[in-house]
Structures are given as structure tokens and as C-alpha cells.
Image (cartoon, rainbow, N blue to C red):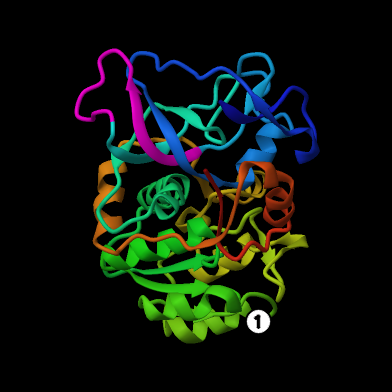
């Protein structure tokens, strides 16, 4: 099969499209013929050596979330059959991962009617991170939540989940996603200088909780990129009045210094719930562009610019 693979750490330039053996599903796994593979910032961290000490030796693959058609079942797998359309996280502890013609999956859900493979493959990581962040933050129905970085895939998923839970949402976002966020019910204001004042004016009272969903926990400038000059966590603490009412999904170093919450334990026990909400139109992650496997360097360049405008997708 064709698969993207790297045998040394570095920039995306080390990634090659190769002919490799198909992987066999282990106990509790399925193998899928991949139709779409979502790209995330985490892919480039893995290529650069993240988790190098916790995974088998090189070579390895990339691509952490996929959608496709079930091709083979591992021992003990029930509730799914060959030919089913599924989506979920890809196994990435072997020589290949999701960016391949065939991939292994340790968790999955059936793709709902009316949802394309590209739309489904955009969901797993953003939905899992956003759902977990809201749970760990402890935000309750009727409270006011500030989602900083709502134009990111995680941020938009968090806005959608929060509104569905009966939570009032103020979102900071750039012009690319502002209108879409307003359409689903969030109050939206811009990033950048004066953000805290604008949020305070919209809130007309205290902000109960704040979620930092920016890619690097940083401020966002008018070009929708993280600013290298400091982070936004002090402003979020000021708006809520308590660092324990703020959670970041990325800026762990600043969180430790300031007493802000973090969330790190990935869990995919809500995949069927994500599928249901996607089928009902509650959950959606915008797909900005699609690429073929041999266009990985072009896709990586846009992804690493921090200005993709939505999810970037490899399609097969």
C-alpha cells in the first residue's frame, strides 16, 4: 500500500510517500481502507520527535484521525462489520498511521448518514479535546463561558458543545470564522488589543469560566496567528477572577506558573456521542482544503502557518 512515512526526525521535509506492507489489526483493532485523514499540529510535533522515547523505533507514519471503510477485524471486535463506514483515531505506534491507504483504528464510530468521509475525519481530535476541556473545566448550564481561540477547530467544537449544553458563550475569533460562530449562537469579538474590555462589555457581568483554545496558548493578532509576545492567560484570569476557572489546551508551561488548569488525558469513549451530534448537525468542524498524499509538503506548509482557515485533509 501507499503510505506517508519518515525514518528520521525533523521538519516535514523528512516525510516520504512509500510502498509499504499493509498492517494487520491486533486484538480490539480494525483496519480501514482510508478515504480521508485529518492533519493536525500534533502531526508535525510527532515528526519532529515528540514521544520519541515512548514509541517503537523508526520508521513511523503520521495522521492521527481517519475516516474510511472497514476492511478487516481484529480478535474480539464486535458491533462493526467489513464494509461499514467509520471514523475515529488512527493507531500511530507503528511504521504507518492514518496517512496511508490502509490504517488501524483502536476506537471508532459509524459515520452518520449525510456526513462525508472528509467531514467525519475532521472530528475526532477536535471533538475529543473540546469535550474533555469543558468537562475538566467544570462549566455548567446557565454559566457564561469565554472561548478564546474559537476560530480554531478545537475552539469551534467547544463553542458548539457548550451551546448544546445550555451554556452562554462569548467567543474570540478572527474574521474567517466570526460570522459562522455568530450564526450558531455565540457572541463574538475580535482578538488582539482591547480584547478583555470588549469581552467585559459583552458579558455585562462576571465571566464564569474561560477556555484557552489557541494553538500555542498565545495572544492572537489580526492575522489570526499566535503572537510571540506573551500569552493570554493573565487576561483570562482577570476576566474570571480566579485561575482555577481558566483552562488551556496548549500553554502548559504558563498554566503551571499561573495556576491555570490543563487537560491532557486523551480518551475516546464518546465517539458514538460525537457521531450522533454530527448526524444531528450540532457538531461540525470546517474543512478548509483537501490534498492527496503526494501533496503532503504543501499541506504541511499551510498547516504550520497557523492560518489554515479550518481543517486540512488528505483524501484517498
Q: Residues within 10 Å of mark 1 (few under 14, many from 20)?
A: few
Closer to the camera, 130 or 302?
302
Q: Residue at x 59, y 29 (%)?
A: 2
Picture layout, residue 91 above or below residue 118: above
Q: Which residues are magenta?
A: 65-82
Q: Which residue is mark 1?
A: 194
Q: Residue at x 57, y 36 (%)?
A: 99
Residue 125 in view, yes or no: yes
| Relative image position of residue 92 (x, y in whole percent) | 54, 27
Q: Residue at x 28, y 34 (%)?
A: 83
Question: In the image, 253: left or right of 287?
Answer: right
| Relative image position of residue 238 (x, y in whole percent) | 57, 68
Q: Quadrant of the N terminus?
A: top right
Residue 270 in view, yes or no: no
Question: In the image, 245: left or right of 21?
Answer: left
Closer to the camera, 161 or 203?
161
Question: In the image, 50: left or right of 287?
Answer: right
Q: Secondary structure at mark 1?
A: loop
| Image-quadrant location for residue 144 | bottom left
Q: Residue at x 67, y 54 (%)?
A: 303
Picture layout, residue 302 above or below residue 11: below
Amino acid at each position: 500500500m501507499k503510505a506517508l512515512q519518515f525514518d528520521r526526525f525533523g521538519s516535514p521535509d523528512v516525510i516520504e510517500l512509500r510502498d509499504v506492507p499493509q498492517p494487520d489489526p491486533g486484538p480490539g483493532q480494525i483496519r480501514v481502507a482510508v478515504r480521508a485523514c485529518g492533519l493536525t499540529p500534533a502531526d508535525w510535533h510527532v515528526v519532529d520527535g515528540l514521544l520519541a522515547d515512548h514509541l517503537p523505533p523508526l520508521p513511523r507514519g503520521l495522521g492521527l484521525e481517519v475516516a474510511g471503510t472497514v476492511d478487516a477485524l481484529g480478535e474480539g471486535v464486535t458491533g462493526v462489520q467489513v464494509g461499514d463506514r467509520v471514523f475515529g483515531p488512527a493507531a500511530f505506534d507503528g511504521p504507518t498511521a492514518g496517512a496511508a491507504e490502509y490504517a488501524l483504528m483502536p476506537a471508532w464510530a459509524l459515520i452518520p448518514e449525510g456526513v462525508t468521509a472528509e467531514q467525519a475525519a475532521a472530528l475526532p481530535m477536535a471533538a475529543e479535546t473540546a469535550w474533555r476541556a469543558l468537562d475538566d473545566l467544570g462549566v455548567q448550564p446557565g454559566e457564561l463561558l469565554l472561548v478564546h481561540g474559537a476560530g480554531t477547530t478545537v475552539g469551534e467544537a467547544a463553542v458548539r458543545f457548550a451551546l448544546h449544553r445550555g451554556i452562554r458563550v462569548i467567543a474570540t475569533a478572527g474574521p474567517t470564522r466570526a460570522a459562522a460562530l455568530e450564526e450558531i449562537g455565540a457572541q463574538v469579538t475580535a482578538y488582539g488589543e482591547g480584547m478583555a474590555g470588549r469581552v467585559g462589555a459583552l458579558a455585562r457581568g462576571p465571566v464564569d469560566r474561560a477556555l484557552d483554545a489557541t494553538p500555542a496558548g498565545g495572544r492572537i493578532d489580526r492575522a489570526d496567528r499566535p503572537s510571540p509576545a506573551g500569552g493570554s492567560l493573565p487576561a483570562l484570569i482577570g476576566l474570571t477572577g480566579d485561575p482555577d476557572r481558566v483552562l488551556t489546551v496548549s500553554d502548559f508551561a504558563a498554566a503551571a506558573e499561573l495556576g491555570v488548569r490543563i487537560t491532557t488525558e486523551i480518551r475516546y469513549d464518546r465517539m458514538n456521542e460525537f457521531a450522533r451530534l454530527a448526524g444531528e448537525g450540532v457538531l461540525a468542524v470546517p474543512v478548509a482544503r483537501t490534498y492527496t498524499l503526494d501533496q503532503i509538503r504543501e499541506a504541511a506548509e499551510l498547516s504550520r502557518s497557523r492560518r489554515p482557515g479550518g481543517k486540512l485533509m488528505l483524501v484517498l
